[in-house]
Image (cartoon, coloured by chain):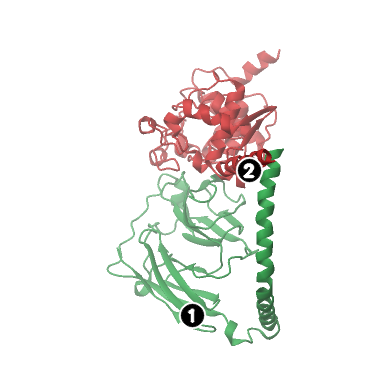
Chain colours: A red, B green
Amino acid sequence: MRMKITLASCAVVVSLLWSVTGLAQESHIGNLVGHANRGKALYQRYCIFCHGEYGDGTGESAPYLDPKPRDFTKAVFKCRSTPSGSLPLDSDLYATISRGVHASGMPSWKPLLRQERADLVAYVKTFSSAFQEEKPGESVSIPPEPLSSPESIKRGGELFQSLNCWSCHGKDGRGHGPSAATLTDSKGYPITPFDFTTGSRFKCGDSDPEMFRDLVTGLDGTPMPSFANAMTPDQRWDVVHYIRSLHVSRKPRGMKIQSEGQ
Amino acid sequence: MEMAAGFNGIVLGDFEDKKQAFMKLKYALIPACVVVALSLSGRVTAGWASPADAPAALKGTVKFEGTAPKPSRIDMSADPLCAKARQTPATTEDIVVGGNGGLTNVVVYVSDGLTSHSFPPPEQPATLEQKGCQYRPHVLALRANQKLEVVNSDETTHNIHPIPNNNREWNMSQPHGVPLEQSFAREEIAIPVKCNVHPWMRGYIAVFKHPYFAVTDKEGSFELKDLPPGTYTITAWQEKLGTKTQKLSIGAGETKTLDFAFKQ
């Protein structure tokens, strides 16, 4: 009897601590279920040096990094499939951990097991109460991509001008627009617009559908806005094709897709 | 399983205690409720018939002490559509002093002393307009969860980018005439708003969970209406000059005057 009571009270204490510290948090990526308590150990081994003990992006290496490590306590993430202003899906965070963030200090963590990456997602979510209070937005739907064509590229170029993309990215896409020098991220650190002529290794993924998605979601925490209300899906593909055409050493995208399809 | 049962046990036990306390309280609460209900029905039928409940009002002005800084001209030549949209050259709006030294765009609000904490947001949306490549109003005050309509009356495309501390951050591109509706869930005074395309554009959005706030007009005057009688801390917030607070008590049906002064 006494044994039972002790066990029960132990369980109560553990479950209370569990819920208070938020370690009960899980992540769900497809069939994978990540657990924050296991993610914590991994975080302390791999992530703490940049993102810090409290997840606020002030780890030991942070002063030497540009851009700065993400502050998880704000729950604002660049790479999402959800609308601007909403939380990312677990699969978005999983994708960022797996892919890494090009042109930043964040490497790809593909060497870790899939389960380990899922555990890290669950732990990263414990740093902000937002993940308990709010639900992530709905995932952007991406229609099939039409083939690139000179007409599509031309239309994309016109949108690039009329939607003021050039203000930051420059009329020639080199990232030297009139507003470029004034840009900061939401923490006040200077940030440079992407130079489209250098290549296509974008922060949130290289593929055309990922570029399409970025135009819908924007990169929260940076000056890059969401164009969800500003363009139709067809227009977004036109802009994607135009941006691809700015990459000087690249073959036209449409031709490549065509040859793959055959 | 055992864990869950133990956890529930605690919660239920706690709930039982609360229930007992509530039972005791109930006898005190019932007469209080009756009084409140009676006075409310009195309001509805006779319109603030009982003088003890009549709403109070607070009026005043916010002044700028000393020589007002001269606003600087804004160069909008980077976007010809902005330059074209202006009949008069644009000037900075961080400190705007009007007639008689009145300081405009100061948010004056009840920061402490309210006994009720539940105010449903109004159905009417608040509107923020982008016109002549500046925000109208420059400082907007609205309620938490109140609809915010963002309007772009300019020919050019803006991006509207609030950078909050206590709310979700969003950043939306808005070409001319495209509707945009947003809201903020939590109180925050005040959220800076940027347009990254036009770096000179800056505005502020103050979000309140109660309806007792006002933004000073061109003469620096404000009015807080329908204030329940009580003792309040009133705060005035200016984007560049900081905050000032004053305490005051206001009785039923009274109209009091309260002035603030800022200097650089």
Q: Which residue is mark 2?
A: A9
Residue closest to the eye, B262 or A248 = B262
| Residue holding disc 1 | B250
Three-letter amino acid code of the residue under disc 1: Ile
Whether residues under marks 1 and 2 lie with C-beta atoms below 8 angstroms apart, the answer is no
What is the number of callouts on the image?
A: 2
Kindly state the secondary structure of the residue where label 2 is placed: helix
**Crowding at label 2, few (<14), some or many (≥20) Cα neighbours within 10 Å?**
some
User: 10 Å neighbourhood of mark 1: few (<14), some, or many (≥20)?
Assistant: some
Q: Are marks 1 and 2 on the same chain?
A: no
Q: Nearer the viewer, residue A241 or A94?
A: A94
Q: Chain of mark 1?
A: B
Chain under callout 2: A
Q: Could you tell me if residue B164 is visible in this image?
A: yes
A22 versus B260 height, above or below = above
Residue A228 in the image, given as x and y percentages of width and height: 61, 41
